[in-house]
Amino acid sequence: MWFNKLNINIAKTHLFAKKKQTIVASLGVTFGIAMFVLMISVMTGVNKILEETQLASTPHVRIYRDISNDRPSLLSQILGTEDWAVVHHQKPKDEPLNLRNGLLIARSLEADPRVLGVSPQLTSQVFFNYGPAQLSGILTGVDIEKEDLLYNVKGKVKSGSIEALLSSNDGILMGQGLANKMNVKSGDKVTVTTPRGDIVLLRVVGTFAMGIGQIDNVRCYANISTVQKVMQKDTRYITDIHVKLKELNQSLTAATEWQSRYGYRAEDWETANATILVSFTIRNMMTGVVVVTLLVVAGFGIYNIMNMTVYDKMKDIAILKATGFEGRDIIGVFISQAAFIGMMGAFAGMLIGLFLSYLVSRAPFDGGEFLSIDHFPVNFDVRFYVFGLVFGVLTTILAGYFPAKKASKIDPVSILRG
């Protein structure tokens, strides 16, 4: 057996005989594990807050009419041939952006057992007039109670209330970033220019903050009937349907099924947020590479120290073998040393990593217009600490095995003869 009481006692004697060397070896592991815990906690914390914030304001599936270019060219329609008729930069035909029977589709989706909530919408680009300037924005007509079920709008309201929006024919709930730019508050009136050039007077009944600058700086909610009136559309006119599912992982399957059934583009959340998801993957890969490099460097340090220990203890090893110790006993002695260094260093690194992560989590951090956070996001996941502890110990044992193997092959006769 590699590990028995006698082998472990000899390993302890070697370790405490050269305390400085033992401490230096342990510090290598400590630094590697501490940096591993800190980096992976911070990086996954950033990814987690970004994903949660994005998901909190993104539908699992969005159904809308896409612009279609899949149609024959004008000349081919007239001449009846595709052999030589070419039209470059052909514009899409003038099609309405609304969903025909959109409200019926929404009711059909509400009956689907996979669906948690459905919010039909009418969305339009508008300009908010601010003195001589015009600020680009998005006016979104919704049933605010259905929208609240999907995105917890009530919990994101900073002033006013969604009830005030329900009881208003000309009210809007304005994104906090846009309200700050226009220097308006609840009760103020704003003028809006529609894509048709019409100027409409609307009243701010409240402000909200989703936590994402791309939304808070441009979006305003209004009753769907209000936006239909502003855009001069009938009561059946909607442009989007947002759907939240009970199970997020069903979004791609549901989107594919609904696109085939209803004939409109159905975009799942992963497709809509592909760029962000790729950035998560890249950050995780870079974190993994840096962390593994740190631990491997620490392992090489232990390997060198164990090699030096074998060289210094040549005579001790020869005496042990001459008194009846076998090669596996010698391996057990040196692997016990490596395991002790690994456990001591990994445990200390785990505690230091936890302390550093806590300090970072308390540090103030301004997400600016992009993200509404006031401190650095850190993910305190127990798995990181367990993995760091296990990986640190295994790395040191592996680093100590090869010097131990070398020590087990020492010929005691040649060493004792000098």
Image (cartoon, rainbow, N blue to C red):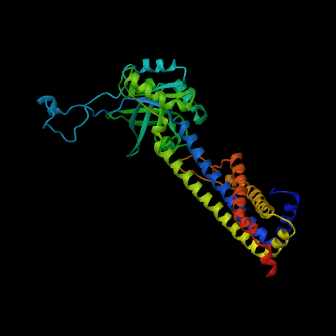
Q: Which residue ends up furthest to the bottom in the rendered image?
A: 418
Residue 235 percent location from the top left of the image: 40, 20
Residue at image location 49% in from the left, 26% down from the top: 119
- Along the horizontal axis of the image, is 62 left or right of 234? right
* Residue 86 visible, this angle: yes
Quadrant position of residue 123: top left
Residue at image location 17% in from the left, 32% down from the top: 74
Residue nearest the viewer, comparing 277 with 12 = 12
Q: Which residue ends up furthest to the front in the rendered image?
A: 413
Residue at image location 53% in from the left, 36% down from the top: 57
- Along the horizontal axis of the image, is 58 left or right of 37? left
Residue 198 percent location from the top left of the image: 33, 33
Residue 110 percent location from the top left of the image: 51, 20
**Which quarter of the image is occupied by the C terminus?**
bottom right
- Along the horizontal axis of the image, is 260 left or right of 358? left
* Residue 369 visible, this angle: no
Name above or below for residue 142 compared with residue 393: above
Residue nearest the viewer, comparing 352 with 93 = 352
Question: Total number of numbered labels?
Answer: 0
Residue nearest the viewer, comparing 67 with 10 = 10
Residue 209 percent location from the top left of the image: 55, 40
Quadrant position of residue 20: bottom right
**Which quarter of the image is occupied by the N terminus?**
bottom right
Residue nearest the viewer, comparing 314 with 377 = 314
